[in-house]
Image (cartoon, rainbow, N blue to C red):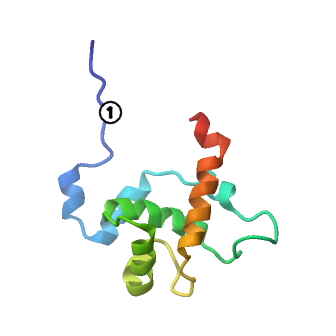
Amino acid sequence: MSLIRQQSLFDMQVLFDLEPTQRFNSVLSGIDIHPIPDIVMKKSRFGPKQSLNYSAMIYSLIIRITERIPFIRDLVKRLSTDLRFKVDCGFLVSDEIPSEASYSRMITLIGDNAFWQSV
């Protein structure tokens, strides 16, 4: 039985040596999120606000893992207190910080989508 090794996107030590902004860009450049916003975009006038930046929300969830932020509540708190982190996640300075409920709805929509279940 042979082992199949997957080639890594980047060397972990190089990643840790980078500044946070460069590290986020390195991680996010290898991830294609284009099908995800189509899933979570609002299709009716009911439900969450239309002013949410869904792409930045997805990026912030990915960055949450790299920054070892354990809970969505902590992510929302960091986004509201750290302007540089907010901009690094892809939010504009004028963007509203999404609530925990907005993140929860988005994660539920992504999880319920048949496309992701078939992959």
**Residue 61 percent location from the top left of the image:** 46, 63
Mark 1, secondary structure of its residue: loop
Amino acid type, mark 1: Gln
Q: Which residue is mark 1?
A: 6
**Residue 101 percent location from the top left of the image:** 58, 71
| Quadrant of the snapshot with the N terminus | top left
- In the visual, does 37 lie left or right of 100? right
Q: Is residue 79 above or below residue 119?
A: below
Q: Quadrant of residue 18?
A: bottom left
State the residue at coordinates (43%, 59%): 62
> Residue 37 versus residue 28: which sits nearer the camera?
37
Within 10 Å of disc 1 (Cα), the crowding (few <14, some 14-19, many 20+) is few
- In the visual, does 7 lie left or right of 92? left
State the residue at coordinates (63%, 59%): 37
> Residue 93 versus residue 114: which sits nearer the camera?
114
State the residue at coordinates (55%, 76%): 99
